[in-house]
Amino acid sequence: MHGKIIFYEDKNFQGRSYESSSDCPDMTSYLSKCHSCRVESGCFMAYDRSNYMGNQYFMKRGEYSDYQRMNGFSDCIRSCRMIPMHRGAYRARIYEKENFGGQMHEMMDDCDNFQDRYSMSDCMSCNVMDGHWLMYEQPQYKGRMMYMRPGEYRNFKDMMGGQKFMSMRRITDMC
């Protein structure tokens, strides 16, 4: 099943629109701005800067009539990545320090608070082996988030300007 998202220049699905079923590194190629969207199927990660940079927001099937108000961001959607559906096991290792140092914990399910579950106050690197995940800066899946696809993430300080992560959940077929 492929995802489908429709972007609109203005709030409340007004203005010109652009439909996509794949990654879009630069929305300005299609629309001068993007302040609302509809996800008709699948899951997407929206970014407030081109080339999948800046603040990120997870979008599943539904209507998003005012991107700015919804996320508290000062800008509009500038790029978007489709999240492929994953079937099977989920597996990720989180590390207390950069470059896979310090405490390590292997996760196969969601964790709403690294401190409570693992007595781990910092998570500074991660290795995602299976599945697609969202990391959050605060416990209980709150605050800014980062999309993690399979791969090695050696230093969150370099990637996110020192942002810490305190909870993590799987992106399941809830889309």
Image (spheres, rainbow, N blue to C red):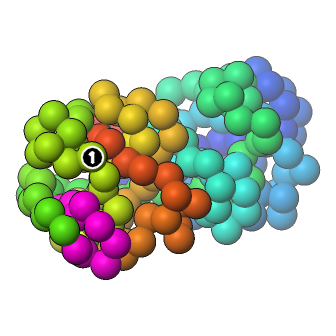
Q: Is residue 26 visible?
A: yes
Residue 151 at x, y = what percent? 31, 75
Residue designated by label 1: 121
At horizontal 31% and vertical 52% (from top left) the residue drawn is 122
Residue 120 at x, y = what percent? 20, 48
* In the image: residue 100, left or right of residue 59: left
| Residue 149 covered by magenta stretch | no
Q: Is residue 158 above or below residue 168?
A: below
In the picture, the quarter occupied by the C terminus is: top left
Chief SS of the magenta region: strand
Q: Which residues are magenta?
A: 92-101
At horizontal 9% and vertical 52% (from top left) the residue drawn is 108
At horizontal 32% and vertical 42% (from top left) the residue drawn is 166
Q: Secondary structure at mark 1?
A: loop
Residue 103 at x, y = what percent? 14, 63
Residue 18 at x, y = what percent? 74, 48
At horizontal 31% and vertical 28% (from top left) the residue drawn is 140
Amino acid type of the residue tagged 1 in the rendering = Ser
| Residue 100 covered by magenta stretch | yes
